[in-house]
Amino acid sequence: MTTQQSFKLTGDLRQHLIREATAARHHAYVPYSHYPVGAALLTASGKVYTGCNIEIASFGATVCGERTAAFKAVSEGERDFRAVAVVTSNGASPCGICRQVLFEFGPEMIVIMADADGQIVWEGPLTDLLPFGFGPTKLAEGQAVAAP
Ligand SMILES: [Zn+2]
């Protein structure tokens, strides 16, 4: 796991992520909740992967915008997340499942929550949203202790 403490999100990059997330939000498929979410995820390579929420009539198959972006990135070989912008009508926060998925690939990443006008509601480290998160490091530590 690489450390990202030297990573600084510039103003231009922040606005780019919010714009990309806003654009991705327009692709949301939300016939049941009518609550579109857009996400734009920045990886260590500098690429941005976007995602939207996709609702399925069998509700358990639904996926959030953040996880769509994360899985697109991982499926393209990216495993080091730096920042994500999430845009909703009211600047809501990522759900618990998405926080866990983001933690797997970017425990120190920056999360930006913005509303539909692009106004930032909150910005901070993922660890503020998921303190004491369980990730690959904790799993490896536990396995070393528990080994017979
Ligand atoms: Zn979610």
Image (cartoon, rainbow, N blue to C red):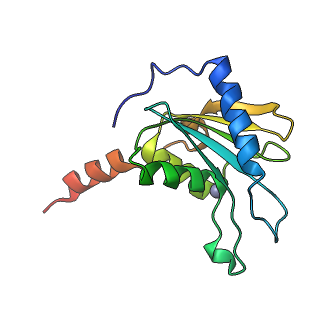
Front in this rendered view, residue 42 or 102: 42
- Which residue is found at the position 62% from the left and 51% from the top? 66
- Which residue is found at the position 75% from the left and 64% from the top? 29
Outermost residue to the left: 148
Front in this rendered view, residue 105 or 13: 13
Pinpoint residue 15: horizontal percent, then vertical percent. Answer: 71, 26
25 relative to 111 in the view: left or right: right
Pinpoint residue 118: horizontal percent, then vertical percent. Answer: 81, 33
Pinpoint residue 132: horizontal percent, then vertical percent. Answer: 48, 44
Is residue 134 visible to us here? Answer: no
Q: Is residue 61 above or below residue 103?
A: below
Is residue 14 visible to us here? Answer: yes
- Which residue is found at the position 74% from the left and 55% from the top? 27
49 relative to 3 in the view: left or right: right
Q: Quadrant of the C terminus?
A: bottom left
- Which residue is found at the position 78% from the left and 51% from the top? 26
Pinpoint residue 88: horizontal percent, then vertical percent. Answer: 79, 47
- Quarter of the picture for ligand 1? bottom right
Outermost residue to the bottom: 58
Q: Is residue 14 above or below residue 77?
A: above
Front in this rendered view, residue 102 or 23: 23
23 relative to 74 in the view: left or right: right
The picture quadrant where one finds residue 117 is top right
